[in-house]
Image (cartoon, rainbow, N blue to C red):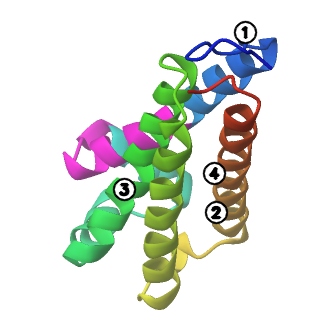
Amino acid sequence: MNTIVGSRAKAPWHLWVIGIVSLLWFAGGANDYLMTKTENAAYLKMAAESTGTSAETILAYFNGYPVWATACWALGVWGAVAGSVLLLLLRTRFAFHAFVVSLIGLAGSTAYTFTSDVPDEFASTGQLVFSVIIWASVIAVILYARAMTRAGVLR
């Protein structure tokens, strides 16, 4: 641990790996959010083909989100991206807080997903597994950011 006030520990190699992987992973969610909210036809067509549904069904479902669920989705996505940037580029302890915001948003959007009338095409085992992976990744980066803060790597 550093003894000089205001100094920080050297960034371990895994900070770069975790930071880059998390930024790329969560950027995928940000891309999904943007493409869906801007109703990008090419993206929605690709998503429709992968789920065996139509782009209109996808749009109808996401456009039917109540404001609070859309806000939760945005918090989940952008909190994770912000946390990744704060972790990787700024090396600040506020990465932990951004990831917690992301987890709160994820909890809200997950609650809506599991209580809303989801089209059958979206209610697959693959979608459930993907949700579990998202939850695990957000929890993992929260724990990692906390550990790096305690180690003095994040200030």
Going from N to C along the chain, the mark reached first, 2 or 4, is 2
Could you give the CA–CA distance between mark 2 and mark 4, rounded to whole angstroms? 11 Å
Q: Is residue 65 visible?
A: no
The reply to whether the C-beta atoms of the residues labelled 1 and 4 are less than 8 Å apart is no
Is residue 2 depicted above or below 112 in this figure? Answer: above
Going from N to C along the chain, the mark reached first, 1 or 2, is 1
Is residue 75 depicted above or below 15 in this figure? Answer: below
Could you give the CA–CA distance between mark 2 and mark 3, rounded to whole angstroms? 16 Å
> How many numbered discs?
4
- Residues 106 and 150: in front is 150
Q: Secondary structure at mark 3?
A: helix
Magenta span: helix, strand or loop, mainly? helix
The location of residue 94, given as percent across then percent down, is: 48, 38
Task: Locate residue 138 relative to residue 101 in the image: left or right.
Answer: right
The location of residue 91, given as percent across then percent down, is: 55, 21
Task: Locate residue 81 relative to residue 7 in the image: left or right.
Answer: left
Q: Which residue is mark 4?
A: 138
Going from N to C along the chain, the mark reached first, 3 or 1, is 1
Tag 2: amino acid: Ser
- Residues 28 and 57: in front is 28
Q: Residues within 10 Å of mark 4 (few under 14, many from 20)?
A: many
The location of residue 87, given as percent across then percent down, is: 56, 27
Could you give the CA–CA distance between mark 3 and mark 1, rounded to whole angstroms? 31 Å
Q: Which residues are magenta?
A: 26-42
Going from N to C along the chain, the mark reached first, 1 or 4, is 1
Q: Which residue is mark 3?
A: 75
Residue at 47%, 78% in the rendered image:
113
Q: Which residue is mark 2?
A: 131
Viewer-nearest of discs 2 and 4: 4
Q: Which residue is mark 1?
A: 10
